[in-house]
Amino acid sequence: MKTITINAYQYDELSDKAKENFQNYYVEKLFPDWWYETAYEDSNQFYLRIEEFDVYRSYCTISFIYDPEDTAKAIVENAGGELFELAKDWADEVNDLFKSYSDYDKYLEWLNEMEYSLDDMEFEDWVLEESGYQDDKESVNDDFLRQLEEYYLRYLKSDYEYYSSEEYIEETCMANDYWFDINGKIL
């Protein structure tokens, strides 16, 4: 019979090279598959759906679950910081856009020159439909969505960087009482 003695080390006792070996192994084999769930949950509360993302290629595709108005309202009521500012800026831009297309006097003059006659309700619908308002509002909504995609890409990158950081890996090792050989291989 042969007796082999193996020295076991806690993470904080490993050499820098052994820690690096384990960190690489952790990111490749043990990285948590749930790391992005907080971003999904956060976006869902604002009626947004993260369709796909890739932190390495730096893209994130999002869609509105309902419409931009519902998303902006949920953000204003429940968020702060950058998201709040994005929603507020979107609302201000939509409001300014509506005001710019609500200059009825300008359109009334044009209608008179063209010899059109519309009642007030038809006129309002006509201004919003025929004047380009819908196209311009769609452009404002697309910009809002693009800004939200950029926000959630930063959110996802931040989470990914945290869960692959030495700090998180060390906390995980200590919390789970991992033991290693001298090279950083988990025992």
Image (spheres, grey):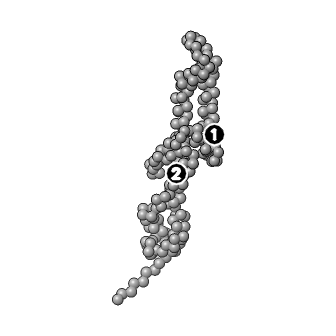
Residue 143, given in percent of the width and then of the height, sits at 54, 37
Q: Quadrant of the N terminus?
A: bottom left
Mark 2: which secondary structure?
A: helix
Q: Report which quarter residue 129 is drawn in.
A: top right
Residue 129 vertical placement versus 164 (above, below): above
Q: Quadrant of the C terminus?
A: bottom left
- Residue 8 visible in the current orientation: yes
The residue sitting at the bottom extreme is: 1
Q: Amino acid at mark 1?
A: Lys
- Residue 59 visible in the current orientation: no
Task: Say whether disc 1 or disc 2 marks the residue closer to the N-terminus.
Answer: 2
The residue sitting at the left extreme is: 1
Which dot marks residue 88?
A: 1
State the separation of the CA atoms marked 1 and 2. Answer: 22 Å
| Residue at the disc numbered 2 | 40
**Residue visible at 48% across and 74% down?**
179
